Image (tube, rainbow, N blue to C red):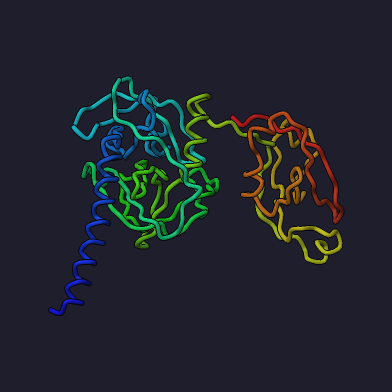
């Protein structure tokens, strides 16, 4: 073998060792805080993210339960209480009443780049404490939660996920928890998703404080509908689609404001509303009991109503 070939082989080996070392170190750092969440015959994964025993996992792993069990990497089984869960982001917080547990903080996902190493740690198919590695394949994706609501700021990765990985952490090569693994697309390969850490930190703080994420609601059933182009041009609308009101709950904020079946909602507050998902995004806690303008189309004319959103139950 020539000197140049020998040099290249040595360099490749060093790069591979560096990659292996980074992945290994990340797993050794985060792994002790990754738990198996057990609920009856089903379960998933979770990560202890605070020194007082708080565990972050998926809502669908614990939904409907007040308590469950978590199993530590050393096999120790501990009782955990469900502090709160949020089906709309598929996140839940548990608490283990035990001191001196290993934990890792939830990191910041805002500086991620496509192509970064991504490592998933969890308990797929009962194979405890398994790890898979890949890259971040996409950022800012949207994914439909089991509740039907659209989840934003989703991380796409090709680090393999399987049943049981749900709720486990997605980690960088620097051992930063950047997401909570939530879903795979079946039967596609390499299409796996995690809730971004920025979302996870916000939701976790709300669940710890209130047991749920407070959101506002106005009490309409709606569906996406196209706005006729001539009408959109005539009225100078910023959208070509809207929310068609198909039902109004009696005595709801929408009913009080005067919304009716058949109305097209094209604006909420100062934002254009091209569909149901956009309306959901704007129904935040800050608007609870705050008078908010709603722009509608009714009988070919634009009208502006005022709705006072109530708190979603």
Image point (83%, 64%), residue name: 233
Image quarter for residue 47? Answer: top left
User: In front here: 102 or 266?
Assistant: 102
The mark tally for this picture is: 0
Q: Nearer the viewer, residue 220 or 182?
A: 182
| Horizontal arrangement in the rendering, residue 153 relative to residue 6 (left or right) | right
The x and y percentages for residue 151 are 52, 47
Residue 298, position in %: x, y? 83, 51
Up-down relation of residue 243 to residue 210 (above or below): below
Give the farthest residue toward the bottom. 2
Residue at x 42% of width, y 45% of height: 178
Is residue 313 placed above or below 26 in the rendered structure? above
Of residues 15 and 207, the one nearer the viewer is: 15
What is the quadrant of the N terminus in the image?
Answer: bottom left
The x, y position of residue 272, in whole percent, is: 73, 51
Residue lying at the far front in this picture: please name it.
3
Describe residue 142's horizontal placement relative to residue 180 as left or right.
right
Q: Position of residue 108 (x, y in %)?
A: 47, 43
Q: Is residue 113 above or below residue 205?
A: below
Query: Residue at 65% of width from left, 49% of height from top?
Result: 278
Q: Quadrant of residue 292?
A: top right
The quadrant in which residue 2 appears is: bottom left
Q: Quadrant of the C terminus?
A: top right
Q: Nearer the viewer, residue 221 or 16?
A: 16
């Amino acid at each position: 073998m020539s000197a140049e070939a020998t040099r290249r082989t040595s360099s490749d080996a060093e790069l591979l060792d560096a990659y292996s070392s980074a992945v290994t170190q990340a797993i050794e750092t985060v792994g002790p805080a990754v738990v198996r969440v057990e609920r009856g015959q089903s379960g998933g994964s979770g990560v202890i993210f605070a020194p007082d025993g708080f565990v972050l996992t998926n809502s669908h792993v614990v939904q409907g339960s007040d308590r469950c069990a978590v199993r530590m990497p050393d096999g120790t089984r501990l009782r955990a209480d469900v502090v709160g869960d949020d089906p709309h982001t598929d996140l839940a917080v548990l608490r283990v009443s035990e001191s001196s547990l290993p934990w890792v903080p939830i990191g910041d996902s805002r500086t991620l780049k496509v192509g970064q190493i991504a490592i998933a740690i969890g308990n797929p198919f009962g194979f405890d404490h398994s790890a898979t590695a890949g890259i971040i394949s996409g950022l800012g994706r949207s994914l439909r939660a089991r509740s039907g609501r659209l989840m934003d700021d989703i991380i796409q990765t090709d680090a393999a996920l399987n049943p049981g990985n749900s709720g486990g952490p997605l980690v960088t090569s620097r051992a930063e928890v950047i997401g909570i693994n939530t879903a795979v697309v079946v039967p596609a390969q390499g299409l796996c998703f995690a809730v971004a850490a920025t979302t996870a930190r916000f939701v976790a703080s709300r669940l710890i404080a209130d047991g749920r994420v407070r959101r506002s609601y106005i009490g309409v059933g709606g569906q996406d509908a196209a706005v006729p182009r001539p009408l959109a041009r005539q009225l100078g609308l910023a959208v070509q689609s809207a929310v068609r009101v198909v039902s109004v709950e009696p005595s709801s904020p929408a009913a009080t404001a005067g919304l009716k079946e058949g109305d097209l909602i094209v604006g909420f507050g100062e934002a254009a509303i091209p569909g149901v998902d956009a309306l959901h995004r704007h129904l935040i806690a800050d608007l609870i009991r705050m008078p908010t303008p709603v722009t509608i189309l009714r009988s070919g004319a634009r009208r502006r109503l005022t709705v006072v959103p109530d708190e979603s139950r």
